[in-house]
């Protein structure tokens, strides 16, 4: 393998970026475990809000939440293990998987507390939130290597190609993930009213359900914006390093 190829670099050759004040090696704030715990709390609550608040109004003869509004404080029981998982010494992949499973399992179990049986709306919302939260954790815990590449005693071409690879990774991932999520969320919101009208003959009931699904989608949108910001952060880091490489080598 030629030495002017970025694949020639070994993992041990690339040093991570120096930490800023109050930052983890990935650049995420040290309070990130607490932040993701709070996000998990609201993800659980928003996943059950339609089934708990809206459905009994739309179809009181069918939906009887066993726990009533007491299900909302249970979000704290979901956020606690999420906080502990993300504050542990586990690898980023393990923290991502366990957090996603915690949200998904909590959502499926809560879906069984509605008298109509397994509430598919709760299951779908929980799985959607668990997916985007998992992406948030994985992207936030990505340890950038591009800064360390600059300090290596390797040919200029190797440095440029290696940083370009990281830049292209984040650019392509950003475009793919954001496009997929936005399209899926848009279809869900636009179809919500039509599906609600098919399920409920009462126009007022269908309106309630549409509002509830829109609220869930709004929180999903907030998480999507946060995910996009984290991806752009990593993309910007690689771009800034790419601009620094020629100047450092010429000096």
Image: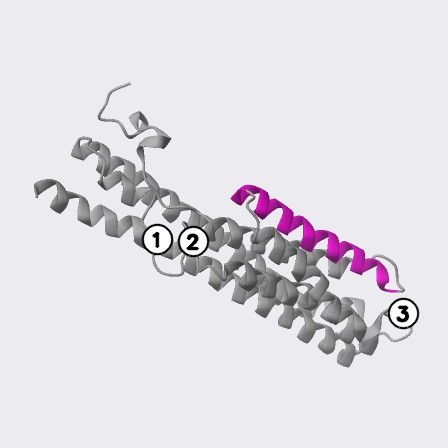
Report the front residue among 251 and 193. 251
- Residue 24 is labelled as 2
Q: Earlier in the sequence, mark 3 or mark 2?
A: 2
- Residue 19 is labelled as 1
- The correct choice, above or below, for 166 with respect to 110 in the image is above
Report the front residue among 243 and 183. 243
Is residue 125 visible in the rendered structure shown here? no
- Residue 62 is labelled as 3
Q: Quadrant for the N terminus, please.
A: top left
Q: Earlier in the sequence, mark 1 or mark 2?
A: 1
Whether tag 1 and tag 2 are in contact, CB under 8 A, the answer is yes
Q: In the image, what residue occupies the spot 35% across and 31% down?
A: 12
**Where residue 55 sits: x, y (%)?**
80, 72
**Where residue 14 sits: x, y (%)?**
32, 36
Mark 3: few/some/many CA within 10 Å (<14, 14-19, 20+): few
Give the CA distance from mark 1 to mark 2. 7 Å
Q: Nearer the viewer, mark 1 or mark 3?
A: 1
Determine the main secondary structure of the stretch shown in magenta.
helix
Range drawn in magenta: 91-114
Mark 1: few/some/many CA within 10 Å (<14, 14-19, 20+): few
Q: Helix, strand, or loop for circle 1?
A: loop
Q: In the image, what residue occupies the spot 48% across and 58% down?
A: 227
Residue at the farthest bottom position: 204
Q: Nearer the viewer, mark 3 or mark 2?
A: 2
């Amino acid at each position: 393998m030629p030495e002017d190829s970025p694949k020639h670099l070994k993992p041990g050759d690339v040093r991570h970026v120096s930490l800023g004040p109050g930052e983890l090696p990935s650049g995420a704030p040290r309070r990130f475990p607490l932040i993701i715990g709070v996000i998990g709390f609201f993800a659980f609550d928003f996943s059950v809000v339609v089934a708990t608040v809206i459905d009994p109004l739309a179809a009181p003869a069918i939906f009887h939440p066993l726990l009533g509004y007491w299900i909302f404080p249970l979000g704290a029981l979901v956020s606690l293990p999420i906080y502990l998982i993300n504050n542990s010494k586990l690898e980023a992949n393990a923290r991502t998987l366990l957090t996603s499973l915690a949200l998904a399992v909590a959502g499926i179990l809560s879906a069984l507390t509605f008298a109509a049986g397994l509430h598919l709306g709760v299951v779908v919302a929980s799985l959607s939130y668990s997916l985007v939260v998992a992406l948030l954790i994985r992207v936030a815990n990505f340890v950038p290597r591009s800064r360390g590449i600059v300090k290596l005693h390797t040919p200029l071409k190797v440095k440029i190609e290696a940083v370009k690879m990281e830049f292209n990774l984040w650019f392509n991932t950003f475009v793919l993930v954001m496009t997929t999520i936005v399209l899926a969320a848009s279809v869900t919101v636009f179809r919500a009213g039509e599906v609600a009208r098919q399920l409920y003959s009462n126009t007022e009931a269908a309106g309630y359900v549409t509002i509830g699904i829109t609220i869930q989608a709004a929180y999903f949108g907030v998480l999507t914006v946060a995910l996009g910001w984290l991806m752009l952060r990593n993309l910007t880091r690689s771009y800034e390093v790419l601009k620094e490489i020629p100047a450092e080598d010429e000096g």
